[in-house]
Amino acid sequence: MNVAVTELRRRPGRFVTATVILTLLATLLLLLGGLLDGLLGGSTSALAAQRGDVVVTSATSENSFLRSRLDAATVARVAAAPGVGEVGGLGVAQLGARVPGNGPRDLADVALFGYQLPPERVPAPPAEGEAYADRSLEPSGVRVGATLRLGPARTPVKVVGWVDGLAYNGQGTLWATAATWREVVNTNRPGAALGPDTFQALVVRAAPGTSPAALAASIDRATDGATSSLTLADAVEAIPGVKEQRSTFNQIIGVTLVIAVVVVALFFALLTVERTGLYGVLKAVGATSGRLFGGVVLQAVVVTAIAAAVGSALALFLDVVIPPGTIPYTLLPGRVLSSVLFLLVAAVVGCAFSLRRVLRIDPASAIGSSS
């Protein structure tokens, strides 16, 4: 251990190449994680923020809000199901919005939500004809007090306040009463007109002592299979494209970690070959193979920690300088911690390839070959 620390202090140049390569890998790993979190947040944050345990849609909708219709009678059956604590209607309309001061063709893509139970970070529903806007719409020219014209019918909706971090399918959101949402849908899409008290989905809170999974099953039994009920986490995963995005990025992140393992393995395997004579001398004076291998692991961990720190700083810098609304990049603290941990584990795994070589060093042979 002391030899490993001394070498790090006195000959840091030996580790520059590995540190630079691992820094690039750490930065790439964090960039990929930030892009994944940004894309998922832009698709799912509006639904993930719902203060409920189960999301209910119609059985024929394949868990799609746009295809789902739940009339007043179905809503009443859901509310009467065993284990239900509270029920709130939810609907969404994805439209283009004409923003005051913008050109006639310069539309902002918005997702208008009509809600009854306020999600996280959203106040109680405003007055009819008004809405809260997600701050991601600000770069598109949306301002508090502005009246947006939604859809081809140019239905007016006035922005009365901001909410933060709530997007749906890559669009900034507006949050209004169910009546305002229903009016916008009926005016702009007469073929998909909604009747009174009809919703696309229901957000259901469980009664005390009822698990979300049990509640979902109870609701579907109570409606005789007319509904499809998912826990909130499963409903988020059911949003189109979410599973595919997560799977693709996780595969790329996995390949990046494998490359990190290979880099550490090759670098420290070469160092072990160079140190064969030194290790032979140390073994001759009583050093154990475990102690020598511990020194290799220590050096790998230190080099990787430095690389991860520099890579994290670069990734955080990019998170600050990237303008909002341009690249879907969000670097979360949990992502930074998990990426650093994975890199450290990769460093230890990479060192394991040097263990066999260290164990096989014979003091007499090593000293004789180096003399």
Image (spheres, rainbow, N blue to C red):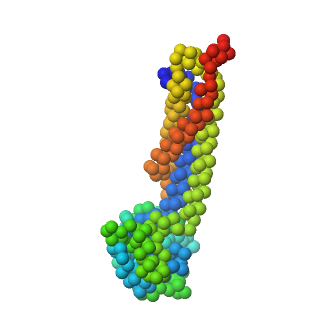
* Residue at left offset 51%, top offset 25%: 291
Q: Nearer the viewer, residue 154 or 33?
A: 33
Residue 10, how many percent across, how many down? 53, 21
Q: Residue 69 appears at what percent x and percent y?
A: 49, 82
Q: Quadrant of the C terminus?
A: top right
Asked if residue 150 shows in the view, the reply is no
Determine the residue positioned at 48% across, 80% down.
Answer: 225
The count of marks equals 0
Instruction: Residue at the far top: name it.
Output: 371
**Residue drawn at (59%, 30%), measured in percent from left and top?**
355
Residue 211 position by quadrant: bottom left
Percent across and percent down for residue 236 are 49, 66
Most extreme residue toward the left, as rendered? 208
Residue 352 or residue 347, whichever sits in front? 352
Q: Residue at coordinates 58% horizontally, 34% vertically from top-left?
A: 352
From this view, report whether residue 307 is shown above or below residue 128.
Answer: above
Q: Identify whether 232 is placed above or below 195.
A: above
Question: Where in the figure is residue 342, as x and y percent of width and height?
Answer: 52, 44
Task: In this rendered view, identify the residue nearer to me: 313 or 62.
Answer: 62
User: Quadrant of residue 360 in the image?
Assistant: top right
Q: Is residue 188 visible?
A: yes
Left or right of 193? Residue 276 is right
